[in-house]
Amino acid sequence: MSAVNDVSATTAGLLAPYAAHDGESRGRRYPESPPQFRSEFQRDRDRIIHSNAFRRLVYKTQVFVNHEGDLYRTRVTHSIEVAQIARSVALALRLNEALTEAISLAHDLGHTPFGHAGQDALNECLREYGGFEHNLQSLRVVDELEERYAEFRGLNLTFECREGILKHCSLRHARALGELGERFIMRRQPGLEAQIANLADEIAYNNHDVDDGIRAQLLDLAALREVRIFRRQHDAVVAQYPQLGERRLVHETIRRMINHLVVDFIHTTQTQLERAQPRSIDEVRALTAPLAMLSDACREEHLELKAFLREQVYRHYKVLRMTSKARRVVEQLFEAFFKDVSLMPREHRDQAVQAETQHGAAGRARAVADYIAGMTDRYAILEHRRLFEPAERT
Ligand code: MG
């Protein structure tokens, strides 16, 4: 711990022994002198906020395409909601709040346009060339693709932050990742800050998709009342406020669902921590199962809501029409650019040519995928028009 670093010195005393501590960080890929007036993990968070990829999340969506309305979640508001939930849990458990926030804000940086439809399509396009995994792409964004610093490529984040960003990874890719990939091979865990960001992600999207689903009129209250976790909170709100208008009724119900899950999350994880008694982040990592979790009862209800949303929202014909269009846009963009890299803007074309010299067709495919994955929804639609609509300006 640096004596200069006042901020982390004051916060370190409040952190639990199993939290990520600045002084015990496994460090950055390129060594840097310690930051002044902020901790290592605050620096990670600040770099993420200043990145291009973070700003692009404004125009990337998960379920509802951006132009359908201004009130729907985008990836940036989703990431902020994840960070809010994760930070509450981290503070209650005396974990490193700044690291938790950094991981939460960065967790979706590698997402393609059009949410999972885009990612599935790109994965299919790259099937012969190593596939496309959005978690791996998030890591690639912070390690390689961001160009902001004179001294290194990427954002040069701490090991702890990179470990959290890489939520999932296939074994094949894990082997190529060295220290960062080890836990997937050994079936070990990341630090608690990463575990918390991961579960906060699920809590956030489950609940905001209820809200967005109602707004898009894909869901109604009668159907939602078949889901236990919703019905219980809805009943309680109606009993307490029988005259409440529908909008406030829905929002109050969702607010209570989130609160119920977060409180359960903290209590259950606290109990797990008391049982396991980890004395350091490395002892957390050495465990075979995560410590951050919901109680069995809560987990079951949470999964029930997730299954309900899959059926009622993600497989709604209006959403499926949108995702089928999105897949086509991504597939056709890939096909056109892969066939002729000179159709891409110069910088991306140059990267593709260079990557091809080094890694053959797989290199070319990766460079095309980087270009497409970086696109916002509307930019992808515009590029598609420019390529395929004869009357569109190029
Ligand atoms: Mg997410």
Image (tube, grey):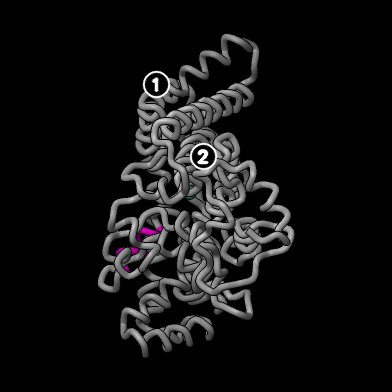
Q: Position of residue 195 (x, y in %)?
A: 45, 45
> Up-down: is 241 above or below 293?
above
Front disc: 2 or 1: 2
Image x and y of residue 79, in percent: 56, 49
Name the amino acid, label 2.
Ala
The amino acid pointed to by label 1 is Glu
> Mark 1 falls on what kind of element?
loop
Residue 125 lies in the magenta stretch? yes
Report the magenta stretch's main SS: helix
Q: Position of residue 178 (x, y in %)?
A: 36, 68
Q: Residue at x 35, y 34 (%)?
A: 307
| 75 shown above or below 32 | above
Residue at left offset 47%, top offset 62%: 138
Mark 2 secondary-structure assignment: helix
Q: Is mark 2 within 8 Å of ligand 1?
A: yes
Image quarter hosting the C terminus: bottom right
Quadrant of residue 340 within the rendered picture: bottom left
Residue 49: quarter of image: bottom right
Image quadrant assignment for residue 125 = bottom left
Question: Is 128 within the magenta?
Answer: no
- The circle on residue 226 is 1
Residue 67 appears in the picture as rendered: no
Kindly tell me whether residue 140 is visible in this rendering.
Answer: yes
- Examine the rendered structure and indicate whether residue 141 appears above or below residue 244: below
Residue pointed to by mark 2:
204
Magenta highlight range: 118-126
Query: Badge 2, how many Cα within 10 Å: few under 14, some, many 20+?
Result: many
- Please state which of residues 165 and 227 is positioned toward the viewer in this rendering: 165
